[in-house]
Image (cartoon, grey):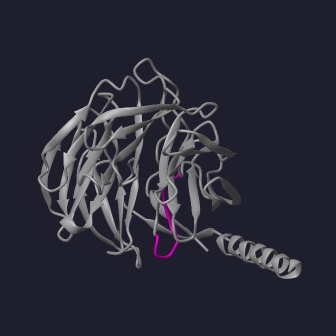
């Protein structure tokens, strides 16, 4: 009886190694140029409709995922994130103008409405349980909930006392929110709109990006100090921490391939890929060189390909009293989307 057990163990190990090998081999496949020499933030993929939504400062550029062709644009001002609600045929864009959510038609890309929220909304998600859109309003240090069907404000969670960053939902009644300058994650009641728990993340510093495995209730957090942090979404227990690059601004979980991906824009830029072996065990797969500043991304769950916004930069200007922390200028004609895959 011992030999079959050992064979099963060896066979299982070989299958796991084959899975890791299949997960590896990521590389830059192509670059999709997009006109406009201005900044960007998040991207969102609609795998079923084969569309990629790219925030590009004063507009959202919509691409065909398969051809890379631009199929339309949605006007805006200082846009950040895009959430998609397929059954309503609507999309939602967070913008710092000083704070609003633009609702648009997914087929025509026409603007339907514009809903004022708190100042400087950054992260934006759709919660399937409550059918609400949630925005993390950094300037107002609050969260705003919008009824997706009506576009009406359902309520807010005020006085959060820190820099709200990215969100994730377990679609079971909870929304998780990174507090970037407090090194904590909040668990929110998505219906009652209140803070249920505050969980410390030390030694993680500046928790930024977030996604989760809803089946195992594991929350994946990218920390700008250079670590990925896995948190038990039921208890707040830190499951594990593993190194990634610095300057992370996006995390994606691929449930079919059991992969967690982090895009980090510091240094040369990298895409860090991990495999979820079990809810409590994670294996590094590879680090893929991307491009400096490639900090935001979106995942096509159909193909496993990753899309990252990038540009080339000139020298950083000298600081001035009016602009003590200047950013380097984007070189004309270099804004594009990198496509990374196997």
Image coordinates of residue 307 in percent, x first then y, are: 48, 63
Answer with left or right where residue 202 lies relative to residue 71.
right
Answer with left or right where residue 240 lies relative to residue 197.
right
Q: Residue furthest top?
A: 321
Image coordinates of residue 263 in percent, x first then y, are: 56, 53
Image coordinates of residue 232 in percent, x first then y, are: 54, 45
| In magenta segment, residue 308 | yes
Residue 247 vs residue 86, the one in the foreground? 86
Up the image or down, 331 lies above or below 13; here it is above
Residue 260 vs residue 70, the one in the foreground? 260
Up the image or down, 139 lies above or below 147; here it is above
Residue 91, quarter of picture: bottom left
What quarter of the picture does the C terminus occupy?
Answer: bottom right
Up the image or down, 110 lies above or below 100; here it is below
Residue 279 seen by the camera: yes
Q: How many marks?
A: 0
Residue 71 vs residue 118, the one in the foreground? 118
Image coordinates of residue 233 in percent, x first then y, are: 49, 45
Q: The magenta stretch spans which residues?
A: 301-312
What residue is drawn where x is 46% and y is 47%?
A: 330
Residue 246 seen by the camera: no
Up the image or down, 200 lies above or below 336; here it is above
Q: Residue furthest front?
A: 1
What residue is drawn where x is 35% and y is 69%?
A: 63
What quarter of the picture does the N terminus occupy?
Answer: bottom right
Residue 293 vs residue 189, the one in the foreground? 189
| In magenta segment, residue 148 | no
Residue 315, quarter of picture: top right
């Amino acid at each position: 009886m011992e030999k079959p057990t050992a064979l099963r163990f060896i066979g299982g190990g070989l299958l796991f190694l084959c899975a890791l090998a299949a997960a590896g081999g990521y590389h830059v496949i192509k670059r999709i140029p997009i006109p406009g020499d201005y900044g960007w933030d998040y991207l969102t993929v609609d795998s079923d409709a084969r569309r990629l939504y790219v925030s590009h400062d004063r507009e959202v550029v919509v691409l065909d995922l398969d051809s890379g062709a631009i199929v339309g644009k949605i006007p805006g001002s200082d846009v950040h994130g895009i959430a998609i609600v397929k059954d309503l045929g609507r999309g939602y864009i967070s913008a710092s103008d000083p704070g609003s959510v633009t609702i648009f038609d997914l087929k025509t890309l026409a603007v339907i409405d514009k809903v004022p929220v708190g100042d400087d909304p950054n992260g934006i998600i759709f919660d399937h349980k409550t059918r609400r859109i949630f925005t993390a309003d950094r300037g107002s240090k609050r969260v705003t909930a919008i009824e997706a069907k009506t576009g009406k404000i359902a309520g807010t969670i005020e006085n959060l006392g820190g820099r709200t960053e990215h969100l994730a939902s377990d679609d079971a009644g909870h929304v998780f929110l990174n507090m970037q300058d407090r090194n904590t994650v909040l668990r929110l009641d998505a219906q009652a709109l209140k803070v249920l728990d505050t969980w410390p993340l030390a030694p993680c510093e500046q928790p930024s990006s977030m996604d989760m495995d809803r089946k195992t209730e594991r929350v994946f957090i990218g920390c700008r100090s250079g670590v990925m942090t896995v948190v038990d979404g039921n208890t707040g227990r830190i499951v594990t921490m593993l190194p990634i690059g610095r300057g992370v601004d996006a995390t994606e979980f691929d449930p079919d391939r059991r992969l967690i991906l982090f895009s980090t824009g510091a240094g040369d830029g990298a895409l860090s890929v991990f495999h979820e072996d079990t809810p409590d065990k994670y294996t590094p797969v590879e680090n893929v060189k991307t491009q400096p500043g490639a900090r935001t991304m979106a995942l096509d769950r159909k193909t496993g390909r990753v899309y990252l916004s990038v540009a080339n930069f000139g020298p950083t200007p000298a600081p001035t009293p009016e602009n003590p922390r200047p950013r380097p200028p984007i070189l004309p004609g270099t804004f594009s989307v990198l496509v990374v895959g196997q």
